[in-house]
Image (cartoon, rainbow, N blue to C red):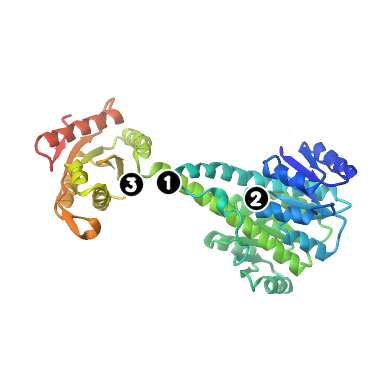
């Protein structure tokens, strides 16, 4: 796994030792000897993960960590604090500063490498989302980093543990700030995870009669839960089991018996990271929707139409099924804009779209091509049925006035429609559209407010 690791320590000997260990695993290593230099490297995007010593002159490691996590541009950067301090209170201070993990000197090499690999993998996934979501700024959607700093409280958690005493300790530690659902049966937990939107799942790896690692694997194998953070509870001295859990993709772990404060801190960290990545996915989804959706009417746009029509046409050809296309043009639309203004024109287009959408089937494709031009593609529909649908659209448009200027005025609107169908033997989507467009202009030449069918 290729990644750039920033090692921060004021002792050159420690830097050289960690650099040698990480380089042996083919990581690219950069170093810093003080907090200010480390922050500069992080801000410039020159690393994928930070290994940070606590005891440094000037800015200590905890303050450096806090600043990394407070900066929206670096808040998603994983930080592992490394120190000689080994008391629970020391670990808690590191986690509360925002650290993703806390390793004690002398460093266990297995723990170091597995933890770095795990966090780098998660960072790579986040980077992909950030890269895709960054394009949204040009489309008018919020900058993806705007929500980088979010709360880790108020989460919904599923606890999978068949030990009553263990469950009681965990629930008691979390119930003030989170909603915790309990499931002792791992089989039932699998179904609950598929039905409920959780922010975190805590899995005991010491379930009676069931391998907790299997549940972790199942969580990662299902699309709905693949990105759900998993916090594992493991017994002391089970390094091989823990290593396997990290390879399966768990996000974090705690050693039993669980320390209350450390549990709370790690849960907050995981929920906070999960909410940030979910926000990125929502932004990405919004970007994709904007790319294929007309912003005024909510219908699909020309880009989506051109790609989707080809697939619908090919499917109809392979299945030897009919396919019909209606080209629609709002009559005298320019006069609406000239007389009442563009806001009134927008009101007309929105209402026009709603009426058309309510008239056709869900399987029919309705798109705005631009301006006052629309198209309806109807699979499994021959010319006689398409003619009836077109006439129904025409009547729904002209049968009731359109409200404009907040409902204070109303105007009459009509539509001209051209119809064409797919023909057997060498026809193409472009040819069908051309015939439908010719039929539309015929309807306009003959006086508008009518439907005309293309000549085969």
Question: In the rendered image, which quarter contains the N terminus?
Answer: top right
For the residues labelled 3 and 1, say whether their Cβ atoms are less than 8 Å apart: no
Image location (x, y in percent) of residue 301: 35, 41
Mark 2 vs mark 3: give the one in front.
2
Residue in view at x 74 percent, y 60 percent = 95
Residue in view at x 34 percent, y 38 percent = 302
Mark 2 vs mark 1: give the one in front.
2
| Crowd tier of the residue under label 1, counting other residues whose Cα lies within 10 Å: few below 14, some 14–19, many 20 or above | some
335 sits left or right of 3 in the view: left
Kindly identify which numbered label has been placed on residue 299: 3
410 sits left or right of 172 in the view: left
On the question of residue 203 being in view, the answer is no
Q: Which residue is mark 1?
A: 289
Q: Which residue is mark 2?
A: 76
SS class, disc 3: loop
First along the sequence among labels 2 and 3: 2
Gap between marks 2 and 3, in whole Å? 36 Å
Q: Find the residue positioned furthest to the front.
A: 58
The answer to which of 186 and 91 lies nearer the viewer is 91
For the residues labelled 2 and 3, say whether their Cβ atoms are less than 8 Å apart: no
Gap between marks 2 and 1, in whole Å? 26 Å
Gap between marks 3 and 1, in whole Å? 10 Å
């Amino acid at each position: 796994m290729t990644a750039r690791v920033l090692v921060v320590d004021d002792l050159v000997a420690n830097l050289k030792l960690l650099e040698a260990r990480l380089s042996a695993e083919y990581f690219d290593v950069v170093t810093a000897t003080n907090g200010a230099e480390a922050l500069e490297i992080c801000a410039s995007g020159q690393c994928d993960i930070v290994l940070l010593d606590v005891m440094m002159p000037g800015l200590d490691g905890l303050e450096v960590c806090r600043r990394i996590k407070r900066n929206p541009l670096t808040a998603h950067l994983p930080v592992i604090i490394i120190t000689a301090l080994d008391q629970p209170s020391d670990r808690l201070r590191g986690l509360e500063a925002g650290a993703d993990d806390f390793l004690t000197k002398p460093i266990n090499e297995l723990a170091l490498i597995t933890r770095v690999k795990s966090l780098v993998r998660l960072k790579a996934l986040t980077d992909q989302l950030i890269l895709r979501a960054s394009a949204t700024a040009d489309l008018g959607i919020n900058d993806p980093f705007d929500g980088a700093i979010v709360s880790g409280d108020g989460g919904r958690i599923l606890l999978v543990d068949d030990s009553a005493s263990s469950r009681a300790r965990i629930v008691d530690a979390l119930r003030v700030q989170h909603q915790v659902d309990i499931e002792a049966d791992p089989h039932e937990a699998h179904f609950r995870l598929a039905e409920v939107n959780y922010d975190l799942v805590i899995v005991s790896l010491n379930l009676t009669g069931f391998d907790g690692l299997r549940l972790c694997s199942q969580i990662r194998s299902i699309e709905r839960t693949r990105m759900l953070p998993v916090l594992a509870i493991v017994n002391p001295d089970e390094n091989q089991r823990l290593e396997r859990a990290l390879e399966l993709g768990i996000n974090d772990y705690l050693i039993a018996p669980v320390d209350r404060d450390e549990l709370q801190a790690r849960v907050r960290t995981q929920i906070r990271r999960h909410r940030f990545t979910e926000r990125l996915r929502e932004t990405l989804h919004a970007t994709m929707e904007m790319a294929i959706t007309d912003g005024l009417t909510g219908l699909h746009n020309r880009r989506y139409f051109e790609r989707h029509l080809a697939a619908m046409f090919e499917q109809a050809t392979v299945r030897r099924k009919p396919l019909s296309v209606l080209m629609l043009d709002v009559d005298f639309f320019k006069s609406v804009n000239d007389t009442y203004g563009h806001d009134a024109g927008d009101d007309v287009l929105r209402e026009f779209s709603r009426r058309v959408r309510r008239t056709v089937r869900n399987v029919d494709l309705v798109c705005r091509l631009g301006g006052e031009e629309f198209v309806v593609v109807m699979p499994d529909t021959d010319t006689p049925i398409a003619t009836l649908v077109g006439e129904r659209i025409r009547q729904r448009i002209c049968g009731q006035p359109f409200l404009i200027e907040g409902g204070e005025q109303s105007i009459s609107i009509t539509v001209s429609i051209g119809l064409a169908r797919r023909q057997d033997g060498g026809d193409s989507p472009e040819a069908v559209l051309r015939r439908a467009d010719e039929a539309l202009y015929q309807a306009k030449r003959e006086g508008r407010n009518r439907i005309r069918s293309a000549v085969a």
